[in-house]
Image (spheres, helix red, strand yellow):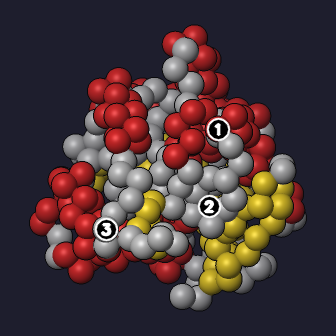
Amino acid sequence: MPYTDAFATLNGCRLHYQDWGRRDAPAILMVHGLTQQSHTFDAVSEQLHGRYRCIALDVRGRGDSAWSGGATYNHRTYVQDVTALLAELGIARFHYMGTSMGGQIGMLLAAQQPAPFLSLTLNDIGPDINPAGALRIGAYVKTVPMSFADFDACIDWAIAQYPWFRGVPRAAVGAAVKWAVQQRDGGGYRFRFDPAIVQGAPTDPALLQKAAAAMWTGLKALPCPVLLVRGAESDILHLDTAAAMARAQPRLIRVDVPGMGHAPTLAEPVVRAALERFFP
């Protein structure tokens, strides 16, 4: 892979990120979803790193970034981490790409400082989350197995968990899963995230409403193009929310991925074509 693994201790936590492409190229900061890690952007980075500097972050508690404890796993801290990373790298203006939670972080950052954004790409996320999907994600995180006997068991679990994997060759599922897990010292495999990440998720309706309002503010304030990718079968980003986002942000372009739930991989042909148009 044509990237460099890099680390920076920021905001009290050692963070890992992948750095693709020329350092003098326009930067795209890529931030993953709740239980993901930076390698979920490998296909996008492969596609774009010839023209852009692709910086894919492992959010604290995930991937190769350090675990920092349940009290630090919240959106306010994540926004601070992203801000600190951009400052550390000397990046004043940037494109931002976020999947699910990563997109929420981007909208919250935009609410604080919209001017540095050159563009925003949101992968299957908006300011408001479909309650059915939120319940599913909450149950999913709490029931993720803490260990697997072997890598085949990891693949079996992924196929059972994600319906769209059922028509995909097993080798391709394994390639998608391999970065999400790691071998345990005592044998077997485990996912590459701190189980405590669920502790920072807000459940107070007032706090959730406040966060959603801030995300709407950020989306509306952006002076740049916005690309919204939506899984056609998504239970997180409702069609009504996607339509409201287009009304709130006139520069928004939407792409729907047929047969895909939450969230598209961004390697689908329709998304790759949209990215070629959006990132010339």
| Rendering coords of residue 141 (x, y %) | 41, 41
Identity of the residue drawn at 28% across and 41% down: 234
Local packing at callout 2 (Cα closer than 10 Å; few below 14, some 14-19, many 20+) is many
Q: Which mark is residue 241?
A: none
Give the amino acid type for the residue marked by disc 3 in the picture. Ala
Q: Is residue 64 visible?
A: yes
Q: In the shown orientation, is residue 4 left or right of residue 129?
A: right
Q: Nearer the viewer, mark 1 or mark 2?
A: 1
Instruction: For mark 2, give the secondary structure.
Output: strand
Give the residue drawn at x 31%, y 68%: 149
Query: Can residue 121 be seen in this snapshot?
Result: no
Mark 2 → mark 3, Cα distance in angstroms: 25 Å
* Above or below, 259 relative to 179: above
The percent coordinates of residue 229 (x first, y second) are 39, 50
Mark 1 vs mark 2, CA separation in Å: 16 Å
**Amino acid under disc 1:** Gly
* Residue reaching furthest to the bottom: 2
Gap between marks 3 and 1, in whole Å?
Answer: 27 Å
What amino acid is found at the position of numbered circle 2 in the picture?
Asp
Residue picked out by circle 3:
149
The residue that label 1 is drawn on is: 70
Element marked by disc 3: loop
Alpha-carbon neighbours of circle 1 within 10 Å: few (<14), some, or many (≥20)? some
Give the position of the C terminus as an image quadrant: bottom right
Residue occupying image coordinates x 64% and y 38%:
70
Residue highlighted by disc 2: 58
| Label 3 close to label 1 by CB (< 8 Å) | no
Left or right of residue 31: residue 271: left
- In the image, residue 184 above or below residue 206: below
- Specify few, some or many for label 3: CA neighbours under 10 Å numbering under 14, 14-19, or 20 or more: few
Using the image as rendered, state which of residue 254 and residue 90 is in the foreground: 90
